[in-house]
Image (spheres, rainbow, N blue to C red):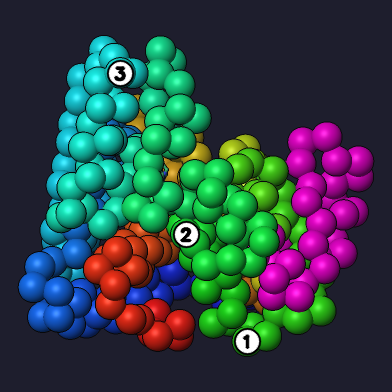
Amino acid sequence: MGDAAIIDGKAFAEDLRARIADLAARFEETAGRKAGLAVVLVGEDPASQVYVRNKGRQTVACGMESFEHKLPAETSEADLLALVERLNSDPAVDGILVQLPLPAHINEQKVIATINPDKDVDGFHVVNVGRLATGLPGFVPCTPLGCVMLLKDRLGSLSGLDAVVIGRSNIVGKPMAQLLTAESCTVTIAHSRTKNLPEVVRRADIVVAAVGRPEMVKGDWIKPGATVIDVGINRVPSAEEGKSKLVGDVDFASASEVAGAITPVPGGVGPMTIAVLLRNTIVAAHRNAGIALAEDAI
Ligand SMILES: Nc1nc(=O)c2c([nH]1)NC[C@@H]1CN(c3ccc(C(=O)N[C@@H](CCC(=O)O)C(=O)O)cc3)C=[N+]21
Ligand SMILES: [Mg+2]
């Protein structure tokens, strides 16, 4: 095989944001208010601060309102739950995102369970997990939905393809497998305990790597021509003294010699995650305001 096509998630996300901006402008005309996204950050983790800043910036750039709530690391669980309740009943807020991970003294499940499922633009609430599992309309987690958008853009129909998802997290692996099943793929969920993992991955027409281990998936695990989606975001030391760089869960150098197409890190799945968050927010705004939005509008 020659060199894989690079799947440009950054460009796709820009395109998606332009369409969202269009819908957001029309929403504002119809509803008489902007769509709104509230993002809650507890603590001072530098990476989280960067993500939250990017989300806020892109929300505003799409013509929606951004409500940022930055709370100190020692915020009590009760105070955080009270804030979520306020956002639930605030009519200017269509979507709520509580940045994870939360400090150890706060029960994440309890916080997610407190978010109104119809404002849960992350798709983490059990009601949305259940809706996805049963094929009901709801909110789908942003990263896996972004991955499916990239796959369908690249491959058209996914029907009948063998897909291997490496990773079984609630945020990526499990919803990814459900979305691919809904697209009529034959899906295998592999993980750290999977026997003969390279062999399992070699069967796949579609590989989704979401394990959180830098450059674990090697080129000789990939079936020639397969489509490789790298969800990993790992910060590792770079060759340059004292600096770090981002790498995925896939060894890009070797995999890109075998794959038919592959997402880079950065510039692949990451930008899609934020664009889909904005997509979910504009969908939430329409639903919450009782304004129709065509199924295929976005
Ligand atoms: N409730 C919640 N929802 C989330 O969706 C959520 C979260 N918590 N906690 C943290 C993770 C991580 N996440 C990313 C979003 C964008 C990029 C992204 O844009 N990455 C760029 C690079 C960014 C950089 O240079 O650091 C890229 O891959 O090109 C990465 C990671 C959302 N998360
Ligand atoms: Mg996992």
In this rendering, position of residue 30 left or right of residue 172? left
The residue at which mark 1 appears reads as 156
278 displayed left or right of 298:
left
**Quadrant into which the N terminus falls:** bottom right
Mark 3 or mark 1, whichever is nearer to me? 3
Report the residue at 76% width, 41% height from top: 191
SS of the residue under disc 2? loop
Which of disc 2 and disc 3 is earlier in sequence?
A: 3
Decide: is 40 above or below 24.
above
Q: Are marks 1 and 2 in contact (CB under 8 Å)?
A: no
Label 1 or label 2, whichever lies nearer to me, is 2
Q: Which residue is mark 2?
A: 139
- The 10 Å Cα crowd at callout 2, few under 14, some 14 to 19, many 20 or more, is many
Q: Is residue 85 above or below residue 225?
A: above
Q: Which residue occupies 77% across, 72% down? A: 185
Q: Which residues are magenta?
A: 178-207
Look at the numbered disc 1 and give the secondary structure of its residue: loop
Q: Amino acid at mark 1?
A: Gly
Residue 153 is situated, as x and y percent measured from the top left of the image, at 54, 82
- Please give the name of the residue rendered at 77% of the width and 36% of the height, measured from the top-left corner: 192
Name the residue tied to disc 3. 78
Q: CA distance from mark 3 to mark 2?
A: 26 Å
Q: Residues within 10 Å of mark 1 (few under 14, many from 20)?
A: few
What amino acid is at disc 3?
Ala
Q: Earlier in the sequence, mark 1 or mark 2?
A: 2
Q: Secondary structure at mark 3?
A: helix
